[in-house]
Amino acid sequence: MSKLASPIIHEPRGDLPVLLSVPHSGRDYPDWLIALSAAGRPGLTTLEDPLVDRLVWRALQRGCGAVIARAPRAAVDCNRSEDEVDPSVVDGVRRGRVSARARGGLGIIPARTQQHGYLWRRPISPKQLDERLSQAHRPYHEAIEAQLALLIDRFGCALLLDCHSMPPPPKGVPPLVFGDCRGRSADGWISTDAVAICGRSGFEAALNDPFAGGHVIERHSRPKAGVHALQLEIDRRCYLDEQLAKPGRGFDRMAALIETLAVELGQSLIGRQFATAAE
């Protein structure tokens, strides 16, 4: 049986202490995963953040590092902790406290979606879960740790920008939402500046409502040690076509915004780091 694909790693090669994370755009579906799906591949692809991995191309050209999942979210969700397991998906796991996300069907192995209902023909074993973690989830987080360590070693600071997309949100929710775990994953000025950069670029943005951030930024942020992390959610209408399937007219504008966020926040972070060191 084929293994899940390991993440793509772009080492930072520029003058910015910025690492991009794209955990939900993986499209490498093994045959065995599709065979397990009650609705086939269409039941699994709705979990993707479509084409967000391609949205970061301008930031990559600018020299930012990136860790990009190739394994699909349906197989294992890199934005969940290893203990966020829904007992309906993994046979024999202890039925203790289940996180709200896992209880809602979106644990480390997603259980169901609104569109397709329960996703799987049968549960998997704890051994199969561990294989998925070993093949895709752990390598993803090990890669983030390694790339952030490179940035800290070179710059003394780092910003992790975890990139996601969201279905068209309800009225009142802006097209961009940043999360900083309600102030725990980044210094306040970084979040404030991120929202302001979006405003100057013609986009309305919110902070922590309705998305405050997931496992990626919770796990890897260490603001007191100079490692800050933001989650970014993008309304899919901003960059996809009307069917929300292919790049739309706004695709390059959104790619340019991600580049601008990386450049301006990265430069500000270095400037503050230098000013602090000079005191």
Image (spheres, helix red, strand yellow):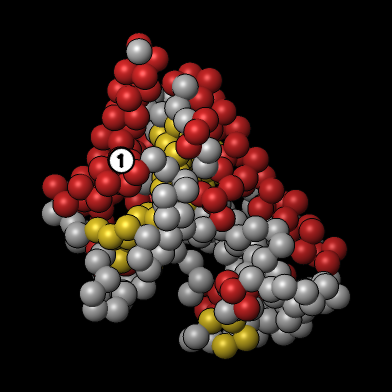
State whether residue 114 appears in this view: yes
Identify whether 37 is placed above or below 28.
below
Q: Percent x, y for residue 245?
A: 36, 70
Mark 1 lies on residue: 189
Q: Amino acid at mark 1?
A: Trp
The mark total stands at: 1
Q: Nearer the viewer, residue 246 or 172?
A: 172
Which residue occupies the extreme front position in the image? 279
- Left or right: where 95 falls relative to 60: right
- Left or right: where 17 falls relative to 132: left
Q: Percent x, y for residue 29?
A: 61, 64
Residue at left offset 29%, top offset 79%: 170
Identify whether 122 is placed above or below 98.
below
Q: Percent x, y for residue 115?
A: 48, 86
Q: Nearer the viewer, residue 77 or 13?
A: 77
Residue at left offset 78%, top offset 57%: 131
Quarter of the rendering occupied by the C terminus: top left
Q: Percent x, y for residue 208?
A: 37, 60
Residue at left offset 34%, top offset 44%: 188
Residue at left offset 63%, top offset 78%: 103
Q: Residues within 10 Å of mark 1 (few under 14, many from 20)?
A: few
Quarter of the rendering occupied by the N terminus: bottom right
Secondary structure, mark 1, is helix
State whether residue 246 appears in this view: no
Identify whether 221 is placed above or below 34.
above
